[in-house]
Image (tube, rainbow, N blue to C red):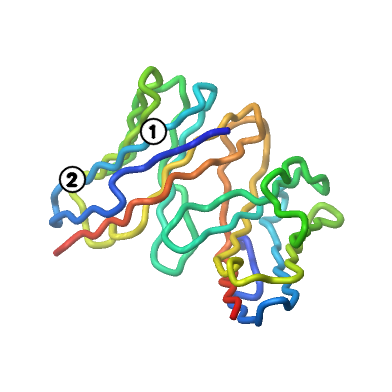
Amino acid sequence: GENVEQHPSTLSVQEGDSAVIKCTYSDSASNYFPWYKQELGKRPQLIIDIRSNVGEKKDQRIAVTLNKTAKHFSLHITETQPEDSAVYFCAASRLAAGNKLTFGGGTRVLVKP
Amino acid sequence: EAGVVQSPRYKIIEKKQPVAFWCNPISGHNTLYWYLQNLGQGPELLIRYENEEAVDDSQLPKDRFSAERLKGVDSTLKIQPAELGDSAVYLCASSYQSGGADEQFFGPGTRLTVL
């Protein structure tokens, strides 16, 4: 089955700096890669996703890049703000297999004012 | 539009007792998921329903866990008997599967503590 590894497990950045989280996956057939943000005690919420036919996707201050050959994808947050503090999870799935998500272990991001 | 609803939000039980969690998905969503989230880890899929059919329950510990989704709407996840290691957050999610990248919407979860 799919295995997703996520690094780093914790990330502390100064407000205004950039944050980068990296994930690797094992199943070359995976073709959908969402990122979820989970604030303390709250539900995970989708913030951005990318399909395998695209190398990069951007939405305001967040962007995701995908390298299918190396089987890794990354989340980039620019101009970080205190409200970006949360746990971020990457995930991977095969859309043809019912979009069963395999999640990474999570990255706790702390943005210091 | 109301989101995914779960109840109870918190449950404390003693080991060997039974417990049940309830989930009401977003209206119109045909696919429902139950995930287990241990502290500091990512969610892990327990079971996935398409309408009322369990299409993936390979990671559900069937000796003590059971689930149902009668009429293809609400779902109940049960543990009987509960063990200390079952303490975790149980998340329900739903989506409308159209064959594409259908976003999964999560509920707030039920935090289970087994004493």
Closer to us: B90 or B93: B90
Q: Is residue A59 visible?
A: yes
Q: Which residue is mark 2?
A: A18
Query: Disc 1 marks which amino acid?
Result: Thr
Q: Chain of mark 1?
A: A
Q: Chain of mark 2?
A: A
What kind of element bears circle 1?
strand
Q: Is residue B22 left or right of residue B91?
A: right
Q: Is residue B81 left or right of residue A75?
A: right
Q: Is residue A52 above or below residue B107?
A: above
The residue depicted at 56 percent of the width and 41 percent of the height is A101
Q: Is residue A14 above or below residue B56?
A: below
Q: Which residue is mark 1?
A: A24
Q: Is residue A57 above or below residue A110?
A: above
Residue at the farthest right position: B71
Q: Callout 2: 10 Å neighbours few (<14), some, many (20+)?
A: some
Query: Disc 2 marks which amino acid?
Result: Ser
Q: Position of residue A109 (x, y in %)?
A: 27, 56
Q: Callout 1: 10 Å neighbours few (<14), some, many (20+)?
A: many
Q: Position of residue A29 (x, y in %)?
A: 54, 22
The residue depicted at 29 percent of the width and 42 percent of the height is A21
The residue depicted at 44 percent of the width and 32 percent of the height is A25
Instruction: Give how far apart the Cα atoms at labels 1 and 2 are.
Output: 20 Å
Q: Nearer the viewer, mark 1 or mark 2?
A: 1
* Quadrant into which the C terminus of chain A falls: bottom left
Q: Which mark is residue B46?
A: none
The residue depicted at 70 percent of the width and 69 percent of the height is B21
Q: Position of residue B49 (x, y in %)?
A: 74, 47
